[in-house]
Image (cartoon, rainbow, N blue to C red):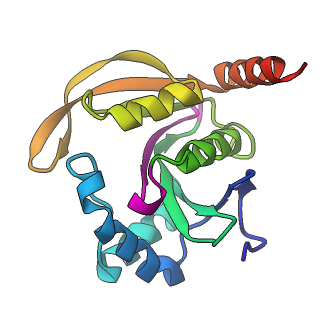
């Protein structure tokens, strides 16, 4: 059941913070999702690896994380983290995310990303979110496009993943462009 510490909610999903008591569920889902995630991301697959991972997201002021949960069964559908948070004149963060296999392709992470964007540009008072995505990761590219991110560039050898330096496309959204996209969506829905 959702708790008072839950951060945002939508019609099918809500966000909650990482908690130690989620380690068994999270890591079991990560193990079940290895094929889906490879070669793009490698979330922790054991409780021993989950503990420091979750602790960093809770305690490090330069990052935060959210579990995307479904209303129908309160299972974890995926996760969305904001890393490399910079305050001051920059007010920016870099996203990392993944859906778990049982929830993939159902639009749940898309709904959760909308909640994270509103939270980042609202209570967190950030101005910009980036998502760096490997060009062949079609599902991730579709996710950020749906959310209103724009392609800003290409970064060769950007991140060391799965034993090699990987090229990435750099996508971003600002508070202003997110607000504009949300108004445009509402205008189209209003008769």
Residue 184 location (% of width, % of height) = 75, 17
Please name the residue shown 18% across and 46% down the image: 161
Task: Name the side, left or right, on which 134 lies relative to 1.
Answer: left
Please name the residue shown 56% across and 42% down the image: 110
Residue 63 in sight in this render:
no
Q: Residue furthest right?
A: 191
Task: Name the side, left or right, on which 78 lies relative to 4.
Answer: left
Residue 187 location (% of width, % of height) = 82, 18
Q: Which stretch did the figure color magenta?
A: 88-104
Residue 118 location (% of width, % of height) = 70, 40
The quadrant of the image that shows the N terminus is bottom right
Q: Residue furthest left?
A: 163
User: 45 or 52: nearer the eye?
Assistant: 45
Task: Name the side, left or right, on which 113 lies relative to 31.
Answer: right
- Is residue 131 magenta-colored? no
Please name the residue shown 69% across and 55% down the image: 12
User: 101 or 39: nearer the eye?
Assistant: 101
Question: Looking at the rendering, which quadrant does residue 160 occupy?
Answer: top left
Q: Relative to residue 21, is residue 55 depicted above or below?
A: above
């Amino acid at each position: 059941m959702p708790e008072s510490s839950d951060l945002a909610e939508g019609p099918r999903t809500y966000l909650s913070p990482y908690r130690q008591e989620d380690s068994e569920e999270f890591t079991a889902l990560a193990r079940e999702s290895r094929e889906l995630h490879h070669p793009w991301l490698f979330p922790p697959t054991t409780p021993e690896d989950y503990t420091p991972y979750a602790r960093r997201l809770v305690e490090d002021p330069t990052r935060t994380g959210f579990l995307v949960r479904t209303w129908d069964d309160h299972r974890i559908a995926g996760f969305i983290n904001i890393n490399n948070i910079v305050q001051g004149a920059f007010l920016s963060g870099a996203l990392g995310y993944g859906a778990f296999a049982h929830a993939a392709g159902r639009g749940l992470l898309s709904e959760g990303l909308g909640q994270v964007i509103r939270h980042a540009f609202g209570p967190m008072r950030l101005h910009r979110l980036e998502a760096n995505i490997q060009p062949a990761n079609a599902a991730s590219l579709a996710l950020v496009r749906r959310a209103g991110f724009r392609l800003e560039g290409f970064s060769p050898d950007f991140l060391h993943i799965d034993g090699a330096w990987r090229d990435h496309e750099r996508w971003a959204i600002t508070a202003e462009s997110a607000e504009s996209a949300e108004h445009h969506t509402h205008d189209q829905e209003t008769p």
